[in-house]
């Protein structure tokens, strides 16, 4: 066992203290730092390619990579967010004024049901439509207004958003340009043997890329397709529902069907047969198959986690870290599996 002197113990204590203090200082912009690191890992291959094209000019290659990230990622997300805020505010006002009445929609469905189904509702004491309408209206309004308020809150914090965006882009430039040297220093500081550090760093970068590409991009694709078919069928606030479907698509046990399936049922029972059939066909054949087609291409088989673990880690990450938890949760879960696989596969640990 290594015996530490008093000076070494004091230095380790000081090191832990200043590290925690530094993390505490970064907390107000932890989201910007986190996404700066994620984007640096994702676009590192592009930076290396541009570095070769610019004949080993790191500053120019980093600037070009940053420009491409702004054009391909930042601007589209900003435009979608602005449209979402506007649409969410409109929906919030329509719910408050009663123009959107979920209880009325439910009554229309009940009146369109066959008699045997109405009798079944009576058997389960669900015939008090007035009470049921009030409960459904209250529940649906609470969910919809919560989503709308979150979107409006994002729009009301424009200054904080801009400052965070600047911090992220500023950090991203240096992570792209100096990331290799920084990663080397971090590896040297970790008190593990080279083979452990190499495997853990490889797993970390692989998991980050797999989580973002495999989960976020697939969810974005499903949300975009869902919003497109809602717009085509004339459903109100298609962009808002597209974002909801994208978030739900991150949860494998839930999925976008929670949104489009009830709308399809509403179409069918209220006489809009072709709209309901089109929505069901599109939801099953297009939205539902996106995950099975895109995820293996974007992620690969080596980093795929069980669906139940993705669900639990995503919900837990979201509860702890908010929006960032959609990435942090699965990443922590995947690293947990990687560390334990490394422990089990290492004879050095098992021999003890």
Image (cartoon, rainbow, N blue to C red):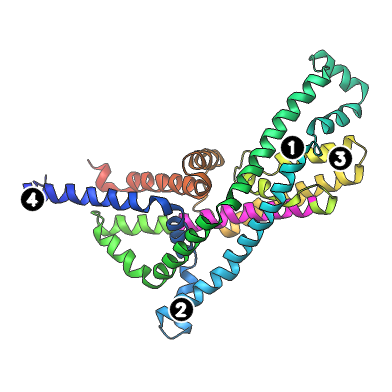
Compare residues 187 and 102 and report the one nearer the observer: 102
Secondary structure of the residue carrying tag 4 is helix
Q: Is residue 320 magenta?
A: no
Question: Whole-Å distance between the Cαs marked 1 and 4?
Answer: 66 Å
Q: Which residue is mark 3?
A: 267
Question: Whole-Å distance between the Cαs marked 4 and 2?
Answer: 44 Å
* Residue 325 percent across, percent down from the top left: 50, 46
Q: Residue at 36% of width from left, 54% of height from top?
A: 200
Q: Is residue 214 magenta?
A: yes
In the picture, measured across the screen, residue 201 lies left or right of residue 105, that is left
Residue range corresponding to the magenta coloring: 206-230
Compare residues 128 and 167 and report the one nearer the observer: 167
| Callouts 1 and 3 close, C-beta under 8 Å | no
Tag on residue 7? Answer: 4
Compare residues 150 and 15 and report the one nearer the observer: 150
Q: Residue at 82% of width from left, 13% of height from top?
A: 123
Compare residues 165 and 175 and report the one nearer the observer: 165
In the picture, measured across the screen, residue 167 lies left or right of residue 285, that is left
Who comes first in sequence, dot 3 or dot 4?
A: 4
Up the image or down, 100 lies above or below 206; here it is: above
Give neighbour class at mark 4: few <14, some 14-19, many 20+ (Cα, 10 Å): few
Q: Main secondary structure of the magenta part?
A: helix
Give neighbour class at mark 2: few <14, some 14-19, many 20+ (Cα, 10 Å): many
Tag on residue 96? Answer: 1
Give the label, 3 or 4, closer to the camera: 4
Q: Residue at 23% of width from left, 54% of height from top?
A: 191
Question: Whole-Å distance between the Cαs marked 2 and 1?
Answer: 51 Å
Q: Which residue is mark 2?
A: 61
Who comes first in sequence, dot 4 or dot 2?
A: 4
* Residue 203 percent across, percent down from the top left: 41, 55
């Amino acid at each position: 066992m290594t015996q530490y002197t008093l000076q070494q113990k004091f230095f380790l204590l000081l090191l832990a203290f200043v590290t925690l203090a530094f993390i505490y200082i970064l907390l107000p912009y932890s989201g910007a730092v986190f996404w700066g690191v994620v984007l640096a890992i994702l676009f590192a291959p592009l930076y290396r390619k541009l570095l070769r094209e610019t004949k080993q000019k790191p500053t120019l290659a980093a600037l070009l990579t940053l420009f491409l990230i702004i054009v391909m990622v930042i601007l589209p997300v900003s435009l979608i967010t602005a449209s979402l805020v506007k649409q969410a505010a409109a929906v919030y006002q329509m719910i408050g004024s009663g123009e959107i009445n979920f209880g009325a929609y439910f009554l229309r469905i009940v009146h369109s049901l066959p008699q045997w189904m109405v009798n079944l509702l009576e058997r389960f004491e669900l015939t008090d439509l007035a009470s049921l309408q009030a409960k459904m209206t209250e529940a649906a309004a609470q969910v919809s207004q919560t989503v709308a308020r979150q979107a409006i809150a994002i729009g009301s914090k424009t200054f904080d958003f801009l400052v965070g965006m600047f911090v992220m882009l500023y950090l991203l430039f240096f992570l792209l340009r100096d990331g290799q040297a920084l990663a080397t220093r971090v590896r040297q500081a970790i008190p593990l043997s080279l083979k452990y550090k190499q495997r853990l760093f490889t797993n970390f970068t692989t998991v980050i890329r797999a989580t973002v590409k495999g989960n976020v991009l697939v969810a974005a694709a499903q949300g975009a397709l869902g919003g497109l078919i809602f717009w085509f069928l004339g459903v109100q606030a298609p962009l808002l529902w597209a974002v909801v479907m994208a978030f739900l698509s991150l949860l494998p046990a839930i999925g976008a069907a929670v949104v489009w399936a009830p709308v399809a049922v509403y179409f069918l029972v209220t006489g809009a047969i072709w709209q309901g059939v089109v929505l069901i066909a599109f939801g099953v054949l297009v939205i539902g198959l996106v995950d099975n087609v895109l995820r293996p291409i974007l992620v690969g088989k080596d980093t795929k986690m069980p669906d139940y673990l993705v669900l639990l880690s995503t919900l837990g990450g979201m509860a702890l870290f908010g929006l960032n938890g959609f990435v942090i949760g699965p990443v922590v879960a995947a690293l947990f599996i990687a560390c334990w696989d490394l422990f089990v596969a290492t004879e050095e640990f098992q021999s003890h």
